[in-house]
Amino acid sequence: MALELTKQGFEVENLIGARVSQVLLRAEALVPGAGREAIEPLLADATLFIDTADLQSGRIVLDGSVSCQAVYRQGGETALRALAAQTTLSHVIEIPGAEAGMFSRVWGTVEHVDAKYENGHMIFLVTCSLRVQALRLQPVEGIASVTGQPGLETAFETLTSVKLAAESSEMSLLRDTVSLPAALDARATLMDWLVAEVEDVSPDLGGVRVKGRVLVETLISCGSADRPAAVVRAPMELNQLVELPEWLTGDVTAEVDVRGVRSQIALGPDGDNPNLTVEAELRVRVLANTTDSPEVLTDIYATQGDSLEVERETLQLCDKVNRARLTESVRGTVLLPDDAPRVGSVIAAQVKPVVGEWQGSGDTGRVEGILEVSVLYTPNGGDQPASVQSELPFSVDVPVGLDEASGLTVQVLAAEASALMGDRLDMKVQLGIRCETRNRRSVGLVTGVETGEPICRRPGIVIVWPESGENAWSIGRRYAIPAAQAAEAAPGRPLVLKV
């Protein structure tokens, strides 16, 4: 009698490859009115936006843009000036085994910005870190049942296969207007910083609703001699619907990419107090995971009739996704160089996190890196703004085991600097850490079974001394007897079997 097999199809997510690349980009802008006077850059920043990630055969092509901004002082002026520049990103990262049609995941961050003045131009050198992954959904057929021969011993296992099934995104434009006090004597906007934090992702009619908070900090120039600049904060709410089929909304996560920030100062409706208008252009991306839970045959043998010829396959599947979101406070002291002007009052603090490495052990991990700190201040007894740059180390423990393929983002939620003494600053930084690790394991499946030669054995009694690692199943297979007969198998203890 022929064996009858019933098969069940499902999909597994395969990590084809993960790569890290670093790229140095250059942007420049003409400094208006620059002559023989000295130009001193005080603050510099850049934002990376990846427009497209195109997976091709053996590689991924990234295209995007980098927006740079700088605050500087010209000659002996006490007023601050600002300018912006932009450049494009076009970078290829080799990923052996990648093919068009696969999923890709991309994380891009600006690690360092250096601004310097050369021949009437402000030159920006921007160091960007790019992390990419290529994922493939592999269709698999497992055996759900086997019939057609008496004396079959079967082992089934219910697998959990988590997979990235879809990605969808929507552009969001946020606007806000802040009324500025007349005493501030606001003149112009100089620089903008933005932090976006996703707080909730939930199913909604037609897709998923992504909610969070967005904080834009704008450095503005002031007409006051003792206050050349000030920071104005504009908090906004993120509430964006991202279209997604209903069957994909069960397990979703969201990420926000900053495309650009624009701000300007205009007179208010009363013609007196000025208003600060801020616009933030964001891309809200939603990643949807689905789970297959098939019960499939993992092993089989016969105890009577014909022996079995078994085909096997080993799969790598993702069976669990561990995520964590936490905030961590970092505190440190910034020492000024001996030749730097002493600190009078702090105008603004800018902090950029640079992740050096991360490591995991079991269910926990550790992230280490440095904080690049830039502080703009007015000197004690002087009226020309100055700045200081420094680095502070940080180390954060996270409740998720980390590996080289983990998704990790670290951003500064808040930064505050205060003068401890004339030659040092106290820094308080709040970090937001989001991490995701997809647990992957090897699973052996039976993919085919055929009958072979009749089982030949001599009846009798066998005394077995199980070795370490042996169990009832392996002993039953060896002697072609039901595994239940060897249920009392234990290493170092004799077992009497009737075969």
Image (cartoon, rainbow, N blue to C red):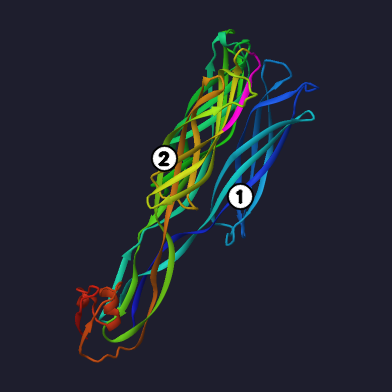
Q: Residues within 10 Å of mark 2 (few under 14, many from 20)?
A: some
Mark 1 burial class by Cα count in 10 Å: few <14, some 14-19, many 20+: some
- What residue is pinned by disc 1? 21
What whole-number distance in Å separates the C-alpha atoms at marks 1 and 2?
Answer: 25 Å
Q: On the image, which quarter does residue 143 sit in?
A: bottom left
Q: Which of 343 and 402 is in front in this view?
A: 343
Quick check: is 217 in the magenta stretch? no
Q: Mark 2 points at which residue?
A: 325
- Where residue 199 sits in the image (x, y, percent)? 42, 35
Q: What is the secondary structure assignment of the residue under circle 1? A: strand
- Please identify the quarter of the rendering in which residue 205 is found: top left
State how many labels appear: 2
**Residue under the point 58% across and 7% down:** 272
Q: In the image, is residue 145 above or below residue 412? A: below
* Quadrant where the N terminus is found in the figure: bottom left
Asked if residue 114 lies left or right of residue 136, the reply is right
The x, y position of residue 475, in whole percent, is 27, 78
Q: Which amino acid does label 2 sit on?
A: Arg
**Which residue: 47% across, 46% down?**
287
Asked if residue 97 lies left or right of residue 4, the reply is right
The disc, 1 or 2, on the residue closer to the chain's N-terminal end is 1
Residue 389 magenta: yes
Label 1 with label 2: CB-CB less than 8 Å: no
Residue 141 location, x and y as percent?
A: 41, 68
